[in-house]
Image (cartoon, rainbow, N blue to C red):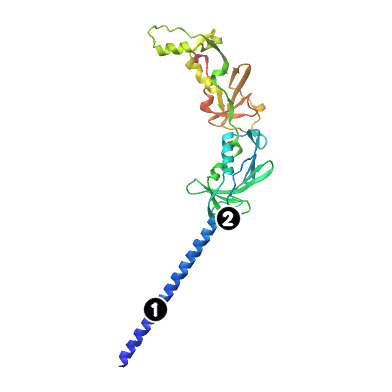
């Protein structure tokens, strides 16, 4: 009897223990569910509070500060200028302008962890947007998202971290050199009426004449070519002055005309234009009554030459392949 009573007592205690453990497990599950609910509720509340940012109508100044260096972009009439000194590349600045003008926050991220998102004072890019002296927008730009389509940002004094609707980090990680207008001069090559190239002690002068087209020698020439000649009352011919005004093939002169008509700088080194020495090649061109002169000076680095032009106040570099299109000798023009 005593053995049976002992067994009953053990069974009773076992059942109690199991029930107690179940209550503990159930309690933990309830707590976990409540915590999850609180987290989700808090996140939803945060997402509901994403700021609704008004699109900006007008912007005339953008200040970009990174590593204690500030780039001041200011609009004058239709052009943008850098630090009131250099003409800026309109396409690049317009992209920056569009980014801050149409800024939207697509999601709330955090209220801290600034180091993780490169939003500390040391890592972030500070952008101030103005119009007529009035601050219209102030943001801190952190690193790009993993998709490279967005960037983490903060707005003015708001402690929250948001995900912006574009990759502002990629656009605003820039320098004065990258933002400067690289176009030295650009005009249609067919407006040039005169060209002179001086290289290795030789001067080659070319003049354009608009002349009546030659009659086709072959009477059986394709009708299409004949019709084109009739429609074109005059044709462009180039003559080589130092060779008794001999006419030269258009295929020979065209690459030089094209190279001179569009000149884009690779960089703007910290060298005064007036101090340039070591002239290697000089190219002059006339457009109506205007004369444009470009000089190619010494080698600059391994793959560039330092140059100057009457169309720019600053010395600039051209890449090796670009410069060598002007390195021509009399034997190259036939």
Identify the image quadrant of the N terminus. bottom left
Mark 1 or 2 closer to N-term? 1
Residue at 61% across, 21% down: 293
Percent position (x, y) of residue 162? 55, 52
Residue that badge 2 annotates: 160
Residue that badge 1 annotates: 19
* Badge 1: residue crowd in 10 Å (few <14, some 14–19, many ≥20): few
Percent position (x, y) of residue 143? 54, 48
Q: Kindly identify which numbered label has been placed on residue 69.
A: none
Residue at 62% across, 26% down: 308
Which residue is at the front of the view, 58 or 4?
Answer: 58
Q: Is residue 327 visible?
A: no
Residue furthest toward the bottom?
1
Residue 145 in the image: above or below residue 80: below
- In the drawing, does residue 119 fall left or right of residue 222? right
Which residue is at the front of the view, 275 or 82?
Answer: 82
């Amino acid at each position: 009897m005593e053995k049976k009573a002992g067994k009953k007592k053990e069974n009773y205690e076992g059942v109690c223990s199991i029930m107690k453990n179940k209550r503990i497990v159930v309690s933990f599950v309830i707590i976990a569910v409540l915590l999850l609910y609180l987290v989700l509720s808090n996140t939803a509340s945060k997402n509901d509070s994403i700021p609704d940012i008004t699109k900006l109508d007008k912007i005339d100044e953008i200040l970009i500060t990174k590593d204690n260096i500030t780039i001041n972009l200011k609009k004058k009439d239709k052009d943008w200028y850098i630090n009131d000194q250099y003409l800026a590349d309109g396409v690049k600045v317009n992209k920056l302008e569009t980014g801050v003008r149409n800024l939207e926050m697509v999601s709330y991220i955090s209220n801290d962890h600034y180091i993780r998102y490169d939003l500390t004072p040391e890592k972030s890019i500070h952008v101030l947007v103005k119009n007529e002296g009035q601050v219209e927008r102030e943001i801190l730009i952190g690193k790009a998202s993993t998709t490279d389509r967005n960037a983490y940002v903060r707005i003015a004094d708001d402690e929250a971290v948001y995900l912006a609707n574009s990759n502002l980090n990629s656009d605003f990680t820039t320098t004065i050199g990258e933002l400067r207008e690289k176009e030295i001069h650009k005009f249609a090559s067919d407006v040039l009426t005169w060209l002179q190239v001086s290289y290795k002690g030789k001067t080659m002068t070319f003049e354009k004449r608009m002349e009546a087209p030659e009659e086709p020698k072959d009477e059986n020439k394709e009708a299409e070519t004949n019709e084109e000649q009739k429609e074109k009352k005059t044709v462009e011919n180039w003559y080589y002055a130092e060779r008794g005004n001999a006419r030269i093939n258009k295929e020979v002169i065209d690459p030089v005309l094209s190279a001179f008509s569009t000149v884009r700088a690779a960089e703007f080194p910290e060298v005064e234009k007036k101090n340039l020495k070591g002239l290697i090649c000089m190219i002059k061109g006339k457009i109506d009554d205007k004369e444009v002169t470009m000089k190619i000076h010494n080698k600059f680095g391994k793959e560039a030459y330092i140059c100057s032009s009457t169309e720019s106040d600053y010395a600039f570099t051209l890449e090796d392949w670009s410069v060598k299109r002007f390195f021509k000798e009399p034997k190259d023009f036939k």
